[in-house]
Image (tube, rainbow, N blue to C red):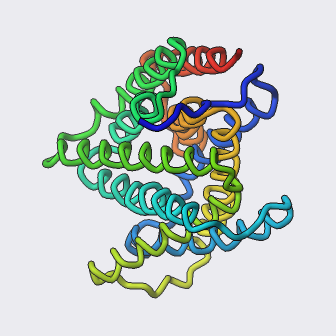
Amino acid sequence: MAAAIPQHAGGRPDRWDYLSLAACGLIWGTTWLVLKFQLGALSPVVSIMYRFIASGLLIFPVSRLQGQRLTLTRKEHGLAAAQGVLVFGFGYVLVYSAEEYAPSALVAVVFATLSLVNTGLFRLVLGQKAARGAWIGAGLGAVGVACLSAGQILASPVRNGLLIGVGLTLGSVLFNALGNLATRVNQSGGAPVSTLTGWAMLYGAAALFVVALATGARFAPPMTFGFWASFGYLTVFGSVVGFLVYYALAHRRGFTLASYTGVLTPPVAMLVSSLFEKVRWDLSALAGLLLIIGGQVMIVRSTRR
């Protein structure tokens, strides 16, 4: 077992931690609505590949402005490649594939377990102990997302291969957790956060390029305003801003807290849908929202020393 690595920098969470959580939840909660303009235009593999090529390249000027080095050591490149392939490559593809078999609400519920899986994996591999409140908070968040999405799940028709969709989502959760583990080891070794994120995105795009070639996907993008406007939003905000904020938060406070953004995203997405798509809230959804907020409070409190 590797030597224990501290989960966070210590001290009381400050306003930047709260703002970071809010920013990630708001950005990724709105991407679900914007993604609709990408569907059908290209295969998800190619669309994500282009997105991470653009995002990765855009991050390097940000790294330079932050005074970070743009080069990585051989070991750092290896861990960045693991992060990229697991998180930005296969992790994304499995979630997109899962939604072909299972309702998106059910996919969101299963993916909300990432905070729990991160906590357990970091304990097992790095010897990193999480406070009891972090475990309870992550569990409350997962239950909250289940309650929030219960109405949509029950209203959705039963699809053939539902278990396949659940299995694919669990695979994505595992890939993301393993990618977060590689990221944490790299960050703890002194790799610059923004530069590391940019290289990881490019490695993930390279993995997706191989998948696209193997599946015979079409590479020519459509020349429509909707596609490129949504592509710009997903690239700049969904990828560059969202992941830079996410990984910076993880560097300061650990992945148990940062990955709770996966729990915060569904209620934001539902709020956006209620504004633009007339989605209605029921008592189960409201109870789920309260559980999510309660879980967030417990995790934040558990990061204090």
At horizontal 70% and vertical 17% (from top left) the residue drawn is 304
At horizontal 57% and vertical 14% (from top left) the residue drawn is 294
Residue 150 x/y as whole percent: 35, 26
Image quarter where the C terminus lies is top right
Q: Residue 56's image quarter?
A: bottom right
Residue 44 x/y as whole percent: 40, 67
Image quarter where the N terminus lies is top left
Q: Residue 284's image quarter?
A: top left
Which one is nearer the viewer's eye here, 279 or 209? 209
Which one is nearer the viewer's eye here, 168 or 85? 85
Look at the picture and state if 19 lies above or below 97: above
Look at the picture and state if 239 lies above or below 16: below
Residue 254 x/y as whole percent: 61, 34
Which one is nearer the viewer's eye here, 279 or 8? 8
Count numbered badges in the picture: 0
At horizontal 80% and vertical 26% (from top left) the residue drawn is 14
Which one is nearer the viewer's eye here, 148 or 60? 60
Residue 189 x/y as whole percent: 63, 49
Can residue 143 be seen by looking at this rendering? yes
Can residue 267 be seen by looking at this rendering? no
Q: Residue 40's image quarter?
A: bottom left
- In this view, the residue farthest toward the left is 160
Look at the picture and state if 243 lies above or below 288: below
At horizontal 37% and vertical 57% (from top left) the residue drawn is 96
